[in-house]
Amino acid sequence: MENINWQHLVTRRLAVQVAIAWNYGFGSLFNKKYNAGINNTLVYYNGKKTDYFVDRDELRRFNEDLDKLLDDPEVVANLMPEAKKFVEETYELIKEITKAADKLSNEELAKLFSKFSKYHANYYTRMWMVFRICERIVIKIESMLDEVIHDENEVKELSWIFSIPLLPNDVTNERMGLLRIALKKNELSDKELKGLLMEHTQKYRHIPLFDFDHEPYDLNHFAEEIKQIKKPSEELEKINSAFMERKKDFESMLDRLNPKPELKNLINMLKDAVFLRDYRDMIRQKLNLSIIDFYKELGSRIGLSIQDVALLTNKEIEKCLLSSKHFDKNKIEQRKKSFLLVQIGNKIKIFSGDAAVETVNGLNLYEVVNDTGVIKGRPASPGRISGTAKIVHTNLDFGKLNEGDILVAAMTRQDFVSVMRKVSAIVTNEGGVTSHAAIIARELGLPCVVGTHIATDILKDGDFIEVDANEGIIRKIRDSENHGL
C-alpha cells in the first residue's frame, strides 16, 4: 500500500458496501469484460465526505486501454447499447432475487447475499464504463476536430454542442411533470392536488438514492418544490424550446462539419454516452430503492440499522449471518467517524476511526495546496458573476445554500438540481464538458467552471468570489472572516 502512487479520482457520499461493489466493478470484473481495469483502490471517509483514490500507474494504463477501445468501430457502435441492456437486465434480476429475503434462514440469506454481491459488483462494470468513457470520447473528438478546424474556441463550442443531451433525463422529466401539476394547481382542490403530488412522489421518489442508505424523496419534498414555482408555463416552454434548439444545433453543426465516418460515429457515440450516463443513474437509483428492504432484513438479523449495515464489508455481513451474532457496535461508531477501505487486487483491508486517520496521515495522500487567490479550471458554461461561496460536500449540505450563492462542490449529481436552480454560479473540482455540472449549468444559464481540482480545498463557506466562466478562472475577493460571515 505504501509503495503505490495514489491519485485522487472522485469525491462522493459513499459507504463501505457500495465502495466494495465499485471496486470489483472497476477492477477484476471490468478487466474481464473490457480488458482494462483498476485493481488497487483506496477509499477514505473523513466524517463529511468520501475520497476515492486509485493507483496512478493503473489509471494511466486504464485510460490508454479505453482509448484503444475507441479505435475499434465495433466497440464504438455496440458499447452503449450493450451497457444499457445490461444495466436494465441486472436491475430486474437483482430486484427479483432479493424480494423474498425475509423468508430465508440466516444460512440461506448469507448465500443469497453472496450471490447478490456478485451481481451488484458486475452491475458497476457498466456504471464505471459509461462514466469514464465520456471523457475519453471528448478528448478523441477534440483531437480530431483540431486537425481540421485549427481554432481552439470553435473546437470547444463544437465539443459543448455535441456533448449536450438531446433528450430529457429523469430529473428533467420530473421537473416537467411538476410544472404540469403547477399549471392546473389553482383549479384543483387540496385533496386533488395532494393526490397528484402523491402519484408524482411514487414515480420519482428514487432520484436522491445514489446509495441504498440514502433517503428517498417524500411528499413534503415535492409539496415544497411546487410552492417555489412562480411561472410554470414559461419554465415548461423554456425546457421544451431548449431541447428543440439543441437538436437543431446538433444537426446543423453535424451538417456543416460533414465529418468523416470515424468522427461522425464518435460524435453519435458521445450523444448516446451522455444520455446513458444519466439513464444508468436512474436505474441505479431505482435499484437502490428496491434493495432497501433487503438490507433492512440483513440488518435486523445482525442487530444493525440500514445505515450501519452500509458500513460493513461483505465478509463481515456473511460472518455475522452464519454465526447468528451481532456486529460490534463500537466498531460501527468508529466507522461513522472515519474509515479507510483499501483493496489491493482482490484483498480487502478496512481501518476504523483513529486507525483510519493515522494510516491516511502516514500515506501523505493529500497535497498541500497554496492559496494564491486564483483558481483555474475549464469553462463549462459562459458568464461572469460575483457572490458568496458555499462548499457542498454531499446532499446533506444543501441546507446551507441561499438564493444567489455560488455552489462549490467536488461534483454535482441529479439530486443537486433542485438547489442548483437557486444559485448564481457553479464551480467543481471534477469534470469536463460532459459532466453533470456543465450540462445543467448550460441548461440553467449559469456561469460554470469545472475541473479545478482544488476549489473545495481552497475556498471556505462565506468567501466572496468572482467566477469568470469565460476564461475558467475563480478569484477570491474577500475571505469569509473579512466580511462578517
Image (cartoon, grey):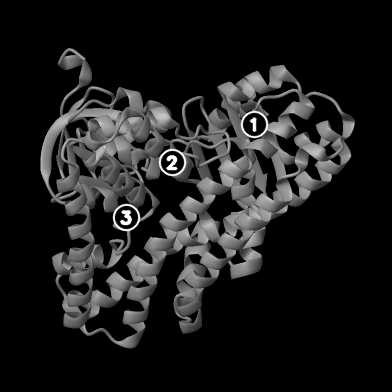
Sequence-first tag of 3 and 1: 1
* Numbered disc 2: secondary structure: helix
Out of 403 and 264, give the one closest to the viewer.
Answer: 403
Residue extending farthest to the bottom is 260
What is the C-alpha distance between the residues marked 2 and 1? 33 Å
Residue occupied by mark 3: 432
The residue that mark 2 highlights is 199
Q: Is residue 250 above or below residue 110?
A: below
Q: Is residue 167 left or right of residue 480?
A: right
First in sequence, mark 2 or 1: give its number: 2
In the image, what residue type sits under mark 2? Glu
Q: Residue at x 49, y 68 (%)?
A: 66
In this rendering, position of residue 476 left or right of residue 54 = left
Q: Position of residue 30 (x, y in %)?
A: 61, 62
Residue 311's mark? 1
Q: Are marks 3 and 2 in contact (CB under 8 Å)?
A: no
Looking at the rendered structure, the secondary structure element under dot 3 is loop
Percent coordinates x, y for residue 252 in the rendering: 17, 76
Q: CA distance from mark 3 to mark 1?
A: 31 Å
Q: Nearer the viewer, residue 154 or 235?
A: 235
What residue lies at 51% left-to-right and 65% top-to-bottom? 84
Quarter of the image for residue 270 reads bottom left
